[in-house]
Amino acid sequence: MQTAINHYPYEKPSLDHMQQHAMHVEQQACTLQHAWAKVPEPLSAQQQQHYQTNIKRLLKEKNAVMVAHYYVEPELQDLALATGGMVGDSLEMAKFCQTHPAETLLVVGVRFMGETAKILSPHKRVFMPDLDATCSLDLGCPIAEFNQFCDQHPDRTVVVYANTSAEVKARADWVVTSSIAIEIVSYLHAQGKKILWGPDRHLGTYIQNQTGADMLLWQGSCIVHNEFKGIELLHLKQKHPNALVLVHPESPTEVVVHADVVGSTSKLLHAVMEADHDTFIVATDQGIVHEMQKQAPNKKFIAAPTAGKGATCKSCAFCPWMAMNGLKACADVLQHGHQEVHVDDALLERAQQPIVKMLDFSATYQHVKQGKPLDLSGGKDAYATWLVEQHHAKRI
Ligand code: 13P
Ligand code: SF4
């Protein structure tokens, strides 16, 4: 099957274009450049075959499992699935890493995903193709400044996005991903809590608008989603009036307002599988289109625009850090045991608590949503009672 990539009118962003962003995010300039420089060269079919065979053998030998995000290269997603691993959004990856019996995890995504896996399963060995694969949200939220921000607002409950360092998570009361953020913040809001949110200002604004919660926002953003343009999206929608518009909530509000579906990568994928539409405009990293096209081979996917006339590219929707992952590096780390994720024991213990809370909340939410009975006696967490009430009121 031809991959979805060939169907799009986009180009990978040039280094020059990314450097323009870097001027605004001075601290990251070097890191962005470094990331694009480390994106592996495309492999020949023969080389791909060679590394795929090696990785399959090494995964078996090491009793390891490969866990990938939807944004990494198609051949990595396919290999994770073909070897009994998984491809998913960041919440699904965390759950899979925590519950899978393999003692060794190969996490193919960005740094916070590998760290989360390690924090949830300290006894497992966690490897990544390249530990330098970070995230602009993580980079834009250094712990010293974030601590100051929290210290200035001790009356607020600290809720942080999973796209953060272990140190920032350790400072938080709750960690959330985009697939469970609204539900958790709704619960906290219903308890009368005021929230300090970090680091993504767009996701924070979206949650605030959806829940009405009092949220003080750290001003971070994702360099990939921040590029989508509202006015250009509107023009594209007018050209394709029957298309369903799918938007990840890390995008600016001017983009989110034109969406038919807003949600995590998995939610956007499910929309493709469930909707009757045959055309979709996709405002997120275009890596996800590989799985979308596999699930719906006859449907058409159009990349949401990232720039107006005269810009260097029409859609630069690729995460440079996700693109750093490659087959050769996967084979190398499994072979040589380098690029292992380590988190200091004391830090790990503190960072684990808000992540485990999120996973427990998410499991209880799914349980209640499916109408399954829940035993509320014996000191269940307060949110269990609230979730049951919400279900009875038909709000979930
Ligand atoms: P998801 O949790 O939706 O997969 O998002 C992770 C991410 O980094 C999006 O840019
Ligand atoms: Fe981070 Fe954005 Fe890349 Fe996701 S797409 S990992 S939020 S930089």
Image (spheres, helix red, strand yellow):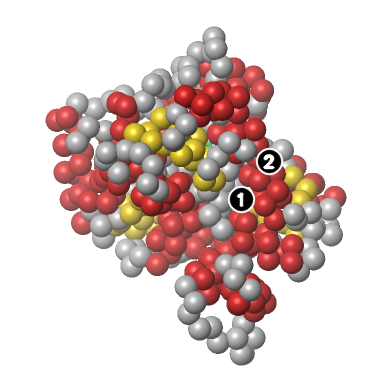
Residue at disc 1, CB closer than 8 Å to ligand 2 = no
The vertical placement of 118 against 315, above or below, is below
Residue at disc 2, CB closer than 8 Å to ligand 2 = no
Residue 20 drawn at (x, y percent): 59, 17
Residue 230 drawn at (x, y percent): 60, 28
Q: Amino acid at mark 2?
A: Arg
SS for callout 2 = helix
Q: Is tag 1's residue or tag 2's residue first in the polypeptide sequence?
A: 1
- Which residue is pictured at 56% across the width and 58% down the height? 180
Residue 212 drawn at (x, y percent): 74, 54
**Residue 318 location, quadrant:** top left
Q: Quadrant of the N terminus?
A: top left
Relative to 42, 312 lies left or right:
right
Q: Quadrant of the C terminus?
A: bottom right
SS for callout 1 = strand
The answer to whether residue 292 shows anywhere in this view is: yes
Asked if disc 1 and disc 2 are in contact, CB closer than 8 Å, the reply is no
Relative to 175, 319 lies left or right:
left
Q: Residues within 10 Å of mark 1 (few under 14, many from 20)?
A: many
- Which residue is pictured at 37% across the width and 46% down the height? 276
Question: As drawn, which residue projects farthest toward the front?
Answer: 241
- Which residue is pictured at 78% across the width and 48% down the height? 216
Q: How far apart in space, not on screen, are marks 1 and 2 (Cα)?
A: 11 Å
Instruction: Write down the residue under mark 1.
Output: 161
* Image depth: mark 1 or mark 2 in front: 2
Instruction: Write down the residue under mark 2.
Output: 201
- Which residue is pictured at 26% across the width and 40% down the height? 297
Give 19 or 343, whichever is nearer the viewer. Answer: 19
The answer to whether residue 287 shows anywhere in this view is: no
**Residue 203 location, quadrant:** top right
